[in-house]
Image: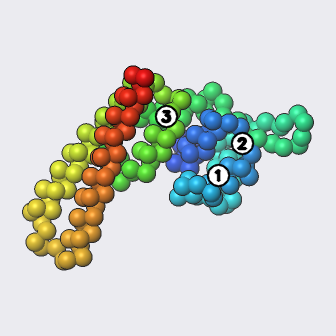
Amino acid sequence: MKLQYTITPTLLDYAILGLLHNQDLSGYRIRKMFEETALGNYSSSPGTIYPALKRLQKLILIEKVVQNNSEKTLFHINNKGLEVLKSWLLKPLVKIDIERKNHELLLRFAFMDTLIKQKEKIDFLESFKTLQSNYINELQLYHKEEAGKMSLHAKLAFEYGIESNKTTLKWCKTTLKEIFKNNIS
């Protein structure tokens, strides 16, 4: 019996799909965008970008397009790729996302602009805000109970974690206000 497995897109793949949603790009341009922006946190190495492009082609989420006036090859997201990207953007948030994947949530939000309906963006942010608030409450309760048992450095590092989560919560609230303001205008 032969085992079948499914290849699922990686976070790097989703980042590439998000970039290609805006415009067709060459592999070199994609790599440069990763090198020159915060996307570099996901990778900018040719040893990861080009295999990711091949994987996305294998998954039939993107295709190569040769420009008529030159030999230049661009990558284009197709309808299936758009569906996969939208599905990822709309994936319900869970506690582990808040605890360990804030960078992924922000990447998802960054690509929602023209792909996702206003209500879905608001739902995403409301869920983000609620989960973030609950997580902060858990952290503060733990801190209250355990801070006296922690070393000074552990306590200070833990307090940094609480404060950075509060900053994320503040961002959620501010972003929701901004989205509502722009929706009314």
Which amino acid is tagged 1? Answer: Met
Residue hosting label 3? 112
Q: Give whichever of discs 1 and 3 has the lower sequence position.
A: 1
| Residue nearest the viewer, comparing 96 with 161 | 161
Residue at x-position 37% and y-position 39%: 175
**Picture quarter containing residue 140?**
bottom left
**Disc 2 + disc 1, Cβ < 8 Å:** yes
| Residue nearest the viewer, comparing 3 with 57 | 57
- Report whether 108 appears left or right of 35: left
Which amino acid is tagged 3? Answer: Met
Residue at x-position 62% and y-position 54%: 34
- Report whether 123 appears left or right of 41: left
The secondary structure type at the circle numbered 2 is loop
Residue at x-position 10% and y-position 72%: 148
Residue hosting label 2? 25
**Picture quarter containing residue 46?**
bottom right
Is any part of residue 5 visible from this angle?
no
The secondary structure type at the circle numbered 3 is loop
**Picture quarter containing residue 151?**
bottom left
Which amino acid is tagged 2? Answer: Leu
Residue at x-position 71% and y-position 50%: 29
Q: Give whichever of discs 2 and 3 has the lower sequence position.
A: 2
The secondary structure type at the circle numbered 1 is helix
Quote the CA–CA distance across marks 1 and 3: 18 Å
Asked if residue 172 is positioned above or below residue 144 in the image, the reply reads above
Q: Give whichever of discs 2 and 1 has the lower sequence position.
A: 2
**Disc 1 + disc 3, Cβ < 8 Å:** no
Residue hosting label 1? 33
Quote the CA–CA distance across marks 2 and 1: 10 Å
Asked if residue 16 is positioned above or below residue 80 in the image, the reply reads below
Q: Where is residue 166 in the image (x, y as percent from the top left)?
A: 27, 52
